[in-house]
Amino acid sequence: MAGRIAFVFPGQGSQTVGMGRAFVETFPEAAARFKVASDALGLDVARLCFTGPEDALALTGNTQPAILTASMAALAGLEERGIKPDFVAGHSLGEYSALVCAGGLDFSAAVRIVRKRGEFMQEAVPAGAGAMAAVIGLPVEAVEAVCREAAGAGVVEVANLNAPEQVVIAGERAAVERATGIAKAKGAKRVVPLPVSAPFHCRLMRPAAERLREVLATVRFRDLRVPCVTNVDAAPVRTAAEVAEALVRQVAAPIRWVEGVERLLREGVDTFVEVGPGKVLTGLIRRIAPAARTLPVEDMAGLEAAVSALAGG
């Protein structure tokens, strides 16, 4: 089983002005995907990605389809070079990119869904009422205890299990702030407030999950060509029914990234190709699995380096 390749796709926070441009300038299929996205949304996605402005790109309803489209442009480059995955996975929003890659979801449908998903998540909690923070230097069990201790101030829960001793919490602002103080007192190296517009992946997102369920019920999913290791269960799925249910549950549940990567390792994956803007997942995977090969493909230099590395075995 050794030698398997996983394509992993980034989520919100990886966006940068200029993302995807190099692939559009090189591959006609990448340019075609930007056109599909623009037509699906009635929005010039290329202009949004290539020139911003940054504050427009940072709006959740824009960010999600923009990252998805930039990731699909990078994927077009890999496909043009004949590189295919044995498994796929994505971090939060990136799960949609992974499903498109695996043939479970049409790209045009995915773009429309993630636009609505972003809007639903934004609208689930009043602006400024929620918060998220990354707790560095405490194991997840300790962070869960911190959240229980802080719960008197409101909802606060583990939202992302990103890497060993990097756990993101989310919830009501007062409770997150209380948890921040408790975590520091219990020995956290750092607690970093995240510049997000809503408290994602906690129970406050349940209204968004139910609205998303209604949208997904109208979408045709297909069984996957290769398995996708989901965020919500850290287990591979292949059927259309499993895929749709995982996307609904993911909105208000923790992102189990560490367990997902560990599952891919057990499945024989030794090479992780990060497909899309940024190198966030590459950094996390290096902390989870230092012996694995990581190949970020966010630009043409990254693509050529990945092609060269994979050609060498």
Image (tube, rainbow, N blue to C red):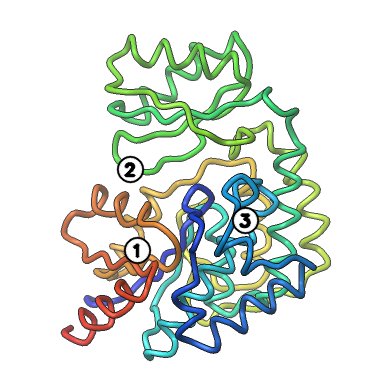
Q: Which residue is mark 1?
A: 264
Q: Which residue is mark 3?
A: 64
Discs 1/3, front = 3
Residue 182 image offset from top left, x and y in percent: 41, 11
Residue 92 image offset from top left, x and y in percent: 54, 52
Q: Secondary structure at mark 2?
A: strand
Say which label, 3 or 2, has the lower sequence index. Answer: 3
Residues marked 1 and 3 touching at CB (< 8 Å):
no
Q: Which residue is mark 2?
A: 163
Residue at 39% x, 67% y is 298
Q: Secondary structure at mark 1?
A: helix
Hey, what amino acid is under mark 2? Ala
Q: Quadrant of the C terminus?
A: bottom left
Hey, what amino acid is under mark 1? Leu
Nearer to us in this view, 163 or 227: 163
Residue 276 image offset from top left, x and y in percent: 45, 66
Say which label, 2 or 1, has the lower sequence index. Answer: 2
Q: Could you give the CA–CA distance between mark 2 and mark 1, rounded to whole angstroms?
A: 15 Å
User: Going by the image, does 278 lie left or right of 109?
Assistant: left
Tell me if residue 296 comes above or below residue 189 in the rendering: below
Q: Which mark is residue 182?
A: none
Q: Could you give the CA–CA distance between mark 3 and mark 2, rounded to whole angstroms?
A: 23 Å
Q: Quadrant of residue 196?
A: top right
Q: Secondary structure at mark 3?
A: helix
Hey, what amino acid is under mark 3? Gln
